[in-house]
Amino acid sequence: MQIGPYSLDNPLALAPMVGVTDRFFRQLCRDLGAGYVVTEMLAANPALRETRKSRLRGDFQGEISPVAVQIAGSDPDWMADAARYNVSRGAQIIDINMGCPAKKVCNKLAGSALLSDPDQVRRILDAVVAAVDVPVTLKIRTGPSPVNRNGIEIAQIAETAGIAALAVHGRTRSDRFKGEAEYATIAAICNEVQFPVFANGDIDSPQKAREVLSRTGADGLMVGRAAQGNPWIFREIRHFLDTGQLLPPPNAEEILAVMEQHLLQLHRSYGERHGVKVARKHIGWYLQGCPDSTVTRKQLMSAQTASEQFAILNHYFRTRSQHARDQVSQPPFMPYPGATVTARHGARAGQRIS
C-alpha cells in the first residue's frame, strides 16, 4: 500500500483509540506485527494544545516512520493550523477524524457528526490538504445513519480534495458500536475510488480478516477494539494471510512479559500514581477470559502501587505456567474466551471483541 511517498509492505493498521493507543501501545503493536499505527485523536482547538493530556497523546518522539498523527475538529482554519503545528513537530502523515461517534466529539460537530454535512467535509479537507506538504488521510464511518449511508459521496469528496488514503469503519454514526459491521458500503467505496482504502470494524480473528479483505476488496485492514489486551492479533493475522495457517496463542510467559513491559512504560510515562490507574484498564483487557482470573483482576484493580501490580501479576502467571507444565496433556494456555484448539496447529479458532 502506498500513502504518498510511504510504502507499507504490511498494510495491517492499528486504529487510533483515545485512551488506548498511546505511544507505548503503538510500539507494542508494531513489535507484534502491525505495519501502520496512528496516534490518539488530538483536538484541533489551539487552546487545548498545551494541556497535559494533549502532550501525552501527542507524544510520538522516536517512533518508526511514517509517523501519522490524527486530528479532530469542525473548523477548517483550526484544522489547517493543527495540521501545520503537528507537521512542525515531526508528523509525516496527518489523519483527519470523521469517524468518532462519541457524544462529546459529535456535540461539537466534529468526528462522525461531520458526515451529515458534506459541504463542511469538503471545506475541512481542502483546508488541511492545502496547509501541509505531507500526505493527508481520512477516517470515516459509512454515514450518519443506516438510512443515510453516504460513505461513497464522502469518499469521492476526499479523493477530489487530494486525500492520500481512507479508512472506513463499517458502521454509521448512529450505530456507534452496536450490532455487526457491514462491509457492502466499504466494498462500494473501494470500487469508486482510486486511493488506498483500509477496512475497519469487527476484525477480531485471522479468519475474519481474510473474509473482510475478500468481501471488500480493501487494500488494508485496520484493527481497533480486538487489539485491546491482544496485540498479538496482528502477527496472527499476518501469518494467516501469508501462509493460510493459524499460529498458536501466546503462552503465559509471553503474556506476562508483554504485560510487564507495557505496565512499566505506563508507570514511567504517566508517573506511578496515575500510571497505576491507566494500567488497570489494560490489565482488565489482558486478563479478560483468562482461567481463574476473577480474584486476580479484583486485586489488580485495587492495587495502589506499581510493585503491587507486578507482584500480583507474577504470582498469577507463574502459577498458570507451573500448572501448564504439570498438566502437559491439557491444551495450551488460552487467554481469550471462545478459544479452541485444533489438533494440527494448537491455535484458537475465535477471539473476543473487547
Image (cartoon, rainbow, N blue to C red):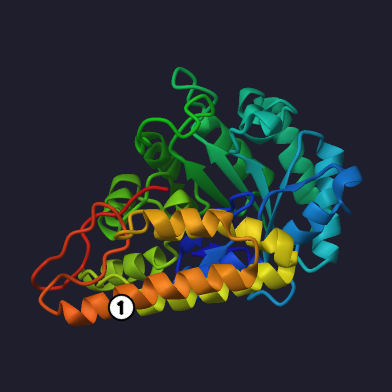
Q: How many marks?
A: 1
Left or right: 269 as drawn, with respect to 142: right
Whether residue 6 can be seen here = no
Above or below: residue 188 compared with residue 336: above
156 left or right, relative to 228: right
Image position of 149 with respect to 312: above or below:
above
Q: What residue is pinned by disc 1?
A: 321
Q: Position of residue 215 (x, y in %)?
A: 29, 45
Q: Residue at x 84, y 56 (%)?
A: 84
The location of residue 141, given as percent across then percent down, is 52, 36
Q: Say which of 194 and 241 sits in front.
A: 241
Task: Tell me which corner region of the image, top left, top right, bottom left or bottom right, holds residue 209.
Answer: bottom left
Q: Return the x and y of residue 285 as percentages of the image width and height.
A: 45, 55
Location of residue 29 in the rendering, given as x and y in whole percent from the top left corner: 50, 68
- Name the residue located 27 percent from the left edge and 51 percent from the top edge: 211
**For the residue labelled by badge 1, is the local secondary structure a helix, a strand or a loop?**
helix
In the rendered structure, which amino acid carries the disc numbered 1? Ser
**Taking 327 as reference, is 179 left or right?**
right
